[in-house]
Amino acid sequence: MGQIIRIAQETYLKRSTKQATELPDGDKISTTVEQTFEISWFKQEDDHILFELSSPIDGVFNWYGHAQHIQVLKDGSPQKLEASEDSNPTSAAFDSTHLSEHFKLWEFITSQTATRHGINNTPPEAVISRLRFLCQEILEPARQAVGPLQISSGYRCPALNRAVGGSTTSAHMQGYAADVIPRSASKLEFANWVRSNCKFDQIILEYGTRSNPSWIHVSGDPKGRRQFFSIP
């Protein structure tokens, strides 16, 4: 048995540390007593625990739980509620840094691949500034218009970009781009809203079908080419 969380009393797993009553349904899930989830790492943040699931729920890996409502176990033994030896140092260092009202830096730098390969995906300050611009000028306005957005991939350092087979010219390496999955609207609704309302460089409907892509790649690169297309 690896590392798990066990629900000690009925509670919500949440996408932020806000009260569950303040969150839309898409940003929380209800749990039952004794329910367990396998996790890759955890870290205490005030009265909450931030953790990464081994398998996502609704496509989301990273969740918060109230520290009094959950228990962390490793090989069956309770763990101290602090960063464990398996914690992801990259995301733990930035988990409270806001890029905009609804987006935190850890959402753009946490990576299962980085964790598995021991890659430090810490962004330089210039990248953080570009991610902040992406959030404030594109993603935050889009979230206000179409609802919650899941970031499936954000910044990739060169080593991580190689590990995932990314393009050598990927905008992800500069902090200009994110792969996004809307949680209330359709992917096309999100893509078309950005196309009509924001300054952007690329909107790419990636994989799946054109009517239902797997995710939407959005770039705020200042080249501002306004390219809109699908792959493959």
Image (tube, helix red, strand yellow):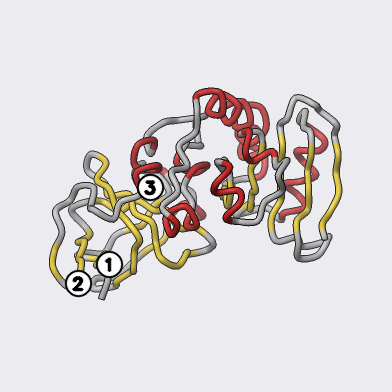
Name the residue: 73% across, 40% down. Answer: 169
Name the side, left or right, on which 202 lies relative to 36.
right
Local SS, label 3: helix
Q: Which of marks 1 and 2 is in front?
A: 2
Q: Name the residue under label 1.
A: 4
Amino acid type, callout 2: Asp
Quadrant containing the C terminus is bottom right
- Relative to 214, say whether 177 is above or below: above
Q: Mark 2 points at which residue?
A: 75
Local SS, label 1: strand
- Residue 223 is labelled as none
Q: Position of residue 198 (x, y in %)?
A: 76, 30
Q: Mark 3 points at which residue?
A: 21
Amino acid type, callout 3: Thr
- As measured in the structure, the alpha-carbon distance from the residue carrying label 3 to the one carrying label 1 is 26 Å
- Relative to 70, say whether 67 is above or below: above
